Amino acid sequence: MARTDSTPSEPKPPTSSPAPVPQAPTTSEESTAFRPSSQSGDEPRLSMASTEAAEPPFSPSSTTPVLEKDEEDSDFGSHSEVNDDLPTEKDLKRVENLLILDSKGQSRPFKDLYSGEGVAPRQLIIFVRHFFCGNCQEYLRTLSSSITPESLLALPTPAFITVIGCGRPELIDMYAETTKCPFPIYAEPTRKLYDILGMTRTYELGKKPDYIHTNLFVSSVQSVVQGLKTGNKALKGGDFKQAGGEFLFEHGKPVWAHRMRNTRDHTEVEELRQVLGLEVVKAPLRKSWSHGVKEEGGRKRSSSWGRLRSLSKGAKEKFGEKEKEKKVVEEGAA
């Protein structure tokens, strides 16, 4: 009887559907952690990956909104593409209706500063850093000691200055008092104006400019103290990394611009005087270590670190002289 070779066939896979992939349990907090309050449970949520890639505000506990940072933006920033080109017509269209806030929180369009009714024909808009920046505070003190509203309005083509910071409007009054700035100050905490107008973000210090009359260490300490004195407003000063600049508008059109390359790169006051059409003179020397500006005739003296040190030294020397006299008397009596 003939034998027939046969190869055993492979077992067929089961025809039943595969078991479902187990899902990790989620808590009610996890299911709503990344869902805006207006979304329902059936709508898609932001993924964990997308939120991890988002840039947090300038400090973990900050309440000031900031723009997202580019991936290439390092801790000390890069100003390789920063220039002093005038804003384009397209950029002006994008920023003209962005809102700025006064100290009371009242808003107005940015364009009102340079083309609104009743404004001077020439408008210099100075963008400063956060409201606790000692370098920018020094800049405004020096500028205020050299340029006054009266001198600008008396020019053949009247001019004026406006200051904008990237912090919250609640800090404007403190900032004005600290800097003794006689010009209007506004807040733009979203930083959209800064971004669209091409201002950079950096921690780079740069060389010390002429407008800074204080020591860097003391200025830094003063900034910290200011923040502590404001209590819960200490984290509302603005983005610590944001740099500023200066823009001059004439009859509503930009005619001159300067953008900071580092945190101490505002235009020197002497150059600003020339740009504005004022006589080019060196800014008066303010009291070292002081917030205040020297008064004419020396009638008004502001308290300062330097003066306190001087008084302390004088008292010490006077005490030493008295001790010597006492010793001489005691020796004579003996």
Image: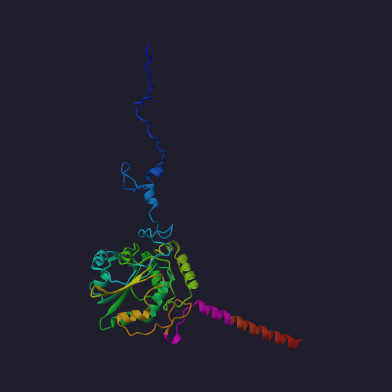
Query: Eyeballing the image, is 322 above or below 91?
Result: below
Tell me which corner region of the image, top left, top right, bottom left or bottom right, holds residue 120: bottom left
Report the magenta residues as a range. Answer: 296-314
The spot of residue 60 in percent (x, y) is 43, 57
Secondary structure mostly seen in the magenta stretch? helix
Q: Farthest residue toward the bottom?
A: 332
Residue farthest to the front, as pictured: 2
Report if residue 178 is visible in the image. no
Residue pictured at 64% horizontal, 82% vertical: 320
**Residue pushed farthest right?**
334
Position of residue 202 relative to residue 316, above or below, is above
Q: In this view, does 225 lie to the left or right of 261?
A: right
Q: Where is residue 79 in the image (x, y as percent from the top left)?
A: 37, 67
Colour style of the rendered protein structure: rainbow
Return the x and y of residue 245 as percentages of the image width and height: 35, 71
> Is residue 225 in view?
yes
Q: Which of the 4 image quadrants contains residue 253? A: bottom left
Asked whether 83 falls inside the magenta stretch, the response is: no
Q: Judge left or right: residue 222 versus residue 106.
A: right
- Looking at the image, which residue is at 28% across and 83% down? 155
Vertical position of residue 26 compared to residue 128: above or below:
above
**Residue 174 at x, y = what percent?**
41, 69
> Which quadrant is home to the N terminus?
top left
